[in-house]
Amino acid sequence: MNLKEYIRSIPDYPKKGILFRDITTLIKNENAFAETINQIVERSKKFNFTKIAAIESRGFVFASAVSFVLKKPFIMLRKKNKLPADVHSVDFELEYGTATIEVHKDSINEKDNILIIDDLIATGGTAEAAAKLVEISKGKVAAFVFVINLFDLGGSDNLVKKNYKVENLIDFPGH
């Protein structure tokens, strides 16, 4: 199955000049969604990991299903002020400003190897922040798996240059 056929491209969203890659058309098709989860599961098996983490919010869609299939704990990396207990926080740069993601302090420890799953990688700022969250929690990043890689924006390459393992299912140009 060619998963690329299930991604809708929307021009000028969220602002003029951006070609948005929309996963809602992928996840609303039960066969395409199931194939996506199967592909993530298969690619994930090559890595040694104890837990799965995902970046809010679209990463949750994929990671929770993979967590269920692989019977691994699922850790939510959330936007600022969305988690009720004590958290570690990382601020990072976005194309449009800055943001913060957080994780509960008791979610990850020094024995954990974390597989990080997200729907898309563009410039890599959010993914790098996720890796920092894992590392300040004393865990290790086993690898990243993305559904979509906007290859010409360089995020995946930047992660590889920082010695992270990276997998993705679909390549698209960023614009």
Image (cartoon, rainbow, N blue to C red):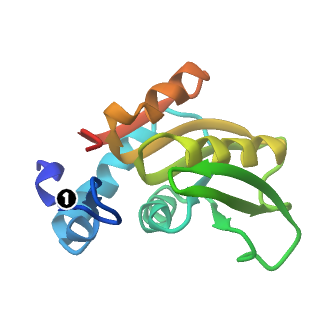
Q: Residue at x 29, y 65 (%)?
A: 13
Residue 50 in view of the camera = no
Instruction: Answer above or below: position of 146 versus 60.
Output: above
The picture places residue 44, in percent across and down from the top left corner, at: 45, 41
Nearer the observer, 98 or 103: 98
The picture places residue 65, in percent across and down from the top left corner, at: 43, 65
Q: Residue at x 58, y 28 (%)?
A: 164
The picture places residue 62, in percent across and down from the top left corner, at: 42, 62
Q: Which residue is mark 1?
A: 7
Q: Could you tell me which quadrant the C terminus lies in?
A: top left
The picture places residue 93, in percent across and down from the top left corner, at: 62, 48
Q: Residues within 10 Å of mark 1 (few under 14, many from 20)?
A: some
Q: Residue at x 33, y 33 (%)?
A: 151
Q: Is residue 76 left or right of residue 167?
A: right
Instruction: Answer above or below: position of 168 versus 116.
Output: above
Q: Residue at x 10, y 54 (%)?
A: 5
Residue 42 in view of the camera = yes
Nearer the observer, 25 or 15: 15
Question: Type of residue at label 1?
Answer: Ile
Q: Is residue 32 left or right of residue 161?
A: left
Nearer the observer, 106 or 77: 77
